[in-house]
Amino acid sequence: MKTVSIARNVVLAALLSPLGSLVYPPSMSLATAQVASVAGLPDFADLAEKTGPAVVNIRTTERIKPGQGGIPGADDEEMQEFFRRFFGVPMPKQQPDKTPRNGRKQMPQQEEEVPRGVGSGFIISPDGYVLTNAHVVDGADEMYVTLTDKREFKAKIIGVDKRTDVAVVKIEGNNLPRLTIGDPNRLRVGEWVIAIGSPFGLENTVTAGIISAKARDTGEYLPLIQTDVAVNPGNSGGPLINMRGEVIGINSQIYSRSGGYMGISFAVPIDEAMRVAEQLRTTGRVTRGRIGVQIGEVTKDVAESLGMQRAQGALIQRVEPGGPAEKSGLEAGDIILKFNGTNIEKSSDLPRLVGATKPGTRSTVTIWRKGANKDVTLSVAELEPEKVAKKEERKQKPEQVANALGLVVSDLSDAQRKELKIDGGVLVDSAEGAASRAGLRAGDVILRLNNSDVKDAKQFNALVTKLEPKKTAVVLVRRGDASQFVPIRPNGQ
């Protein structure tokens, strides 16, 4: 009753006081009232002050030859977004000047070092090892790392791993500030976190949010941490930090239809990043294990049909001929329940566990087959570098219109098919509409449409014209080393 009375007195005093002022009861100071007004919300000031000095800005450049057409970084999405937002125009195209001035013969010019892009990173050791994203530094000729105290260092790349989008760079220094490494496995959904980075080159920008989901499977090699922290171009490579001041992830991706922040961002878990970083520091490359299976999720229907008590594990959809799995007797239709004693709750758990296993290791796989568990022993092989459909030099083609699924496709070259070890298929040049919503993107390879094998672009587009307009189509998509069936729902479905 007393509390209600005090609250009523405060409200009445506010109404009777001049506009913009408040009268507080004798027992409540202004500072106390301010704290009370934000009760339950964390104060990030001390956290930002403590961790900020170890976060760095990374500026990359590249060297171009005189008369080289195009602006360096023109293919970089972050640079394109920078120009669009700040200048309101697309990134300009530089054309070589082929006309000698005053008719005189031009003297040979030296290569010019020009800006390529900006990103973020953070120091993980006092002697200057820095973690960042692979896409921030890959392809750069020179790198410059700037600390919050304005010291600038020329950096060198120690190693890059595109599969996890992790890179390690080195600056020469001693007693540098560094971040404490945390444990992403202790994260809880709803937990407060902050991101520090250089969005659009604005150094040491702090944003905050919560953990939205853990181990989010985005179709890439490893599950990611999902947050609602504001992350924009330039934040890439910066740390995701918990309230204990520990880095628990590397900000890497955003989900966006505009190129800017839309409430969903992803970070590479720091334990995976550190595992990669250790290999890059010691050998300059990352080795991963593989067992030679293509897997899918175990749905409730599949589990019931196979006599399982609950949906768990990874369903083997295809066994690689001559691979470790085939040699050990694994078959399509088997469900992998454990790998070296660790439970496989969902299919995305398996690639992470196998990938972290040293090639040549004898491993035990527990499977579900014909209503019973069975242990199988195999020798883990080494995962080859990711195979993708590489862009090739070809003649400029007239702009094509997307088909009814929202896809523009082209034929694969003989070299591309040989590299991917496939006979048919088409390369996705662009995806929009229904195909884009389904997750397809440029660079994917489509192998099947519903029940038909895809041979070439002409045949694929012909098959699309025969689809029922309101019926979901299913395509078999090859992305990197993985293949999966993707449903494409018509517009409005």
Image (spheres, grey):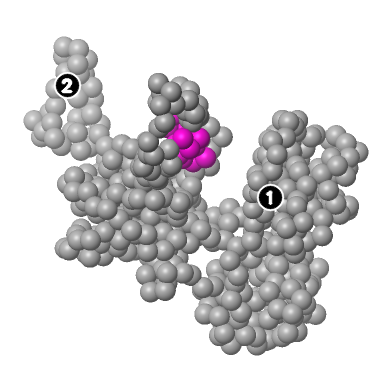
Q: Residue at x 73, y 48 (%)?
A: 427
- Place of residue 205 in the rendered image (x, y in percent of width and height, measured from the top left): 30, 40
- Place of residue 73 in the rendered image (x, y in percent of width and height, measured from the top left): 46, 40
In the image, which disc is placed on residue 444? 1
How far is disc 2 from disc 1 in space, using C-alphas? Answer: 62 Å
Which kind of residue does numbered mark 2 sit on? Leu
Say if the magenta span includes residue 74.
yes
- Place of residue 298 in the rendered image (x, y in percent of width and height, measured from the top left): 71, 65
Magenta extent: 67-84
Element class at badge 1: loop
**Near-viewer residue (61 or 475):** 61
434 sits left or right of 358 in the view: right
Which is more N-terminal, label 1 or label 2?
A: 2
The quadrant in which the N terminus is found is top left
Placement of 26 over or under 114, stated as above or below: above
Which kind of residue does numbered mark 1 sit on? Asp
